[in-house]
Amino acid sequence: MKLIPEWYEHQYCLIAWPCNKDLYGKIINKARDEVANVINEIAKTEHVIVLSNKEDINEIQNKTDHKNIDIVECKLDDSWMRDIAPIFYNEDKKLKSISFEFNGYGKYPGYLNDNKISKFISNYLNIPTITSDLVIEGGAITYDDKKNLFSTKNVIFNKNRKQKHNSEYIIEELKLLFDLNYIFFFENGLMEDDTDGHVDNLLCPIGKNKYLIATTHKLDPNYEILEKNKSDLIKFFKDTNQTFDLIEVPLPTRKKINNKNIISSYINFYFSKNKIILPKFNVKEDNEVKLTFENLFPNREIIMLETENINYGGGNIHCITMNVPKI
């Protein structure tokens, strides 16, 4: 197994400081406050490395407790660390990385700095890296400890990603790069998801053949999509003779900020050392989901942090973080 599941021990947590004022508009300061809260919470038990544009460094220093935090100057276009960081893997008991291409989800022109970040991180951490010409965002893939990788067709094969290769090549290349047995693709992600449907809003493997999967009620516009996702995944596991246990996690009640629908999922969380850091939406599902996680992870503290202003930008806690595994 090359890919290292997220619930394994971490060496660092990587976070990028929000800088895209065109995306956040007047609420960027509120989003930065929420990111600072995430940084400070993770830094209680993990070493956090915050990447930032030069002009924002003083603000980070003022908003964070720096005892377990390093601030690294670089050039950023946006703050979705999960999508622009390298993908780390284990080869011969050594930590290595792959730098994929990033093209701003095929819709945002300002991405050239972000496309250089994966190599920057590997160089900064002195981790050997290779490059791939596949356009792959970190939030577009998730993986378990059984050589399965999960993604969404409408992301990786979307014409806006401008892949240089056909789908068959991409599948075989990913299997080769990561020594995979299977790749499973959902047809679609959440409606109105700015990423076209990242899998980190849909599914999260948590070990011991258990998988968290997003579900919702019949009146939600995502109902049919999520029901098909669940039935397709069940069929995949049965067809490949794999043991599995799907744990349903409801989507939060839909909310709007500045008349914009906020695309939200509790599955967009972060595994920290002895903790799980969940987004809090101040809706009725919060307590139900927290209880579910407490039952699933009795040895981890379940922390819920308010993130609606981060979410306004199009992502959540998982999207703004990237774990660097410890080998």
Image (cartoon, helix red, strand yellow):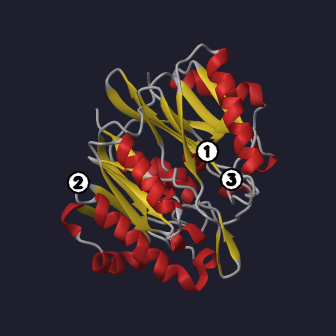
Residue drawn 30% across and 63% down?
41
User: Residue 213 at x, y = what percent?
Assistant: 57, 41
Judge left or right: residue 94 versus residue 224: left
CA gap, disc 3 and disc 2: 36 Å
Residue farthest top in this picture: 241
Q: Is residue 24 above or below residue 293?
A: below
Cα–Cα span, label 1 and label 3: 19 Å
Q: Amino acid at mark 3?
A: His
Residue type at numbered disc 1: Val
**Residue marked by disc 1:** 199
Which quarter of the image is occupied by the C terminus? top left
- The residue to which callout 2 is attached is 45
Circles 1 and 3: CB distance less than 8 Å?
no
Identify the residue under disc 3. 217
Q: Is residue 215 visible?
A: yes
Q: Indicate which disc, 1 or 2, sits on the residue closer to the N terminus.
A: 2
The kind of secondary structure element at disc 3 is loop
Residue 324, above or below 207: below
Query: Looking at this view, is 67 or 269 the one in front?
Result: 269
